[in-house]
Amino acid sequence: MDSDEEPDTGDGQRWGGILRDGVIRLGNKWIKGGILLLVLGSALESRAEELNPETTAVRYVFASSVEPQLYGWIQEEVADEWFDGDVPKICHVCDNVYRHATDNGSIITRGTQNMLNRKTLAQLMGVEAFLTIIARQYGETVRIEAALHDLATETPRFSKHLEWSRPWFD
């Protein structure tokens, strides 16, 4: 028996799992949990993807629960989180309704959720992606839903939920 192998302790631990003393068993190998947690911890630490403020437009949607005096603060936090403090382009027309001709009439669509709208808006604004920020306030907490749509895929490139405490200075 190798020094890094332990005798089989039953079906419950045969396929791996966390055991006492911080030891993790994978197959027949035992790995100290500290090493694995160190590697996984740095990989799981999520810092927002850095976006280019010249090629990304931001669409803000503030729920009625968000106090208007917090709008500027939320926009600053978004700039710090995704644009390294730079002010991105703001898409004021991203929520407009658009009518597109089709073979059998026309369709009406809204905003950047539709690829055709996204491409039209991107051409008008000179951008390649749209970051949609939906802000809601629950007491002293502001919850942010962020989704980045690009021109390559219909689904968002990423979607993220953040929770910020209301600033003390407002």
Image: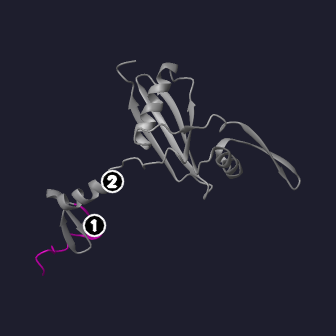
Q: Is residue 148 left or right of residue 162?
A: right
Query: For the residue labelled by badge 1, is the local secondary structure a helix, a strand or a loop?
Result: loop
- Mark 1 lies on residue: 16
Quarter of the figure that contains the N terminus: bottom left
Identify the residue at image location x=67%, y=36%: 93
Residue 45's x, y, as percent?
32, 50
Magenta portion: prevailing SS class: loop
Identify the residue at image location x=54%, y=46%: 56
The extreme bottom residue here reads: 1
Q: Amino acid at mark 1?
A: Gly
Q: Is residue 15 magenta?
A: yes
How many neighbours does mark 1 have within 10 angstroms: few (below 14), some (14-19), or many (20 or more)? some
Magenta range is: 1-18
Residue 115's x, y, as percent?
67, 52
Q: Real-space Cα distance between discs 1 and 2?
A: 21 Å
Identify the residue at image location x=58%, y=51%: 128
Which mark, by number, is residue 44? 2
Q: Is residue 153 left or right of residue 108?
A: left
Q: Amino acid at mark 2?
A: Leu
Quarter of the figure that contains the C terminus: top left
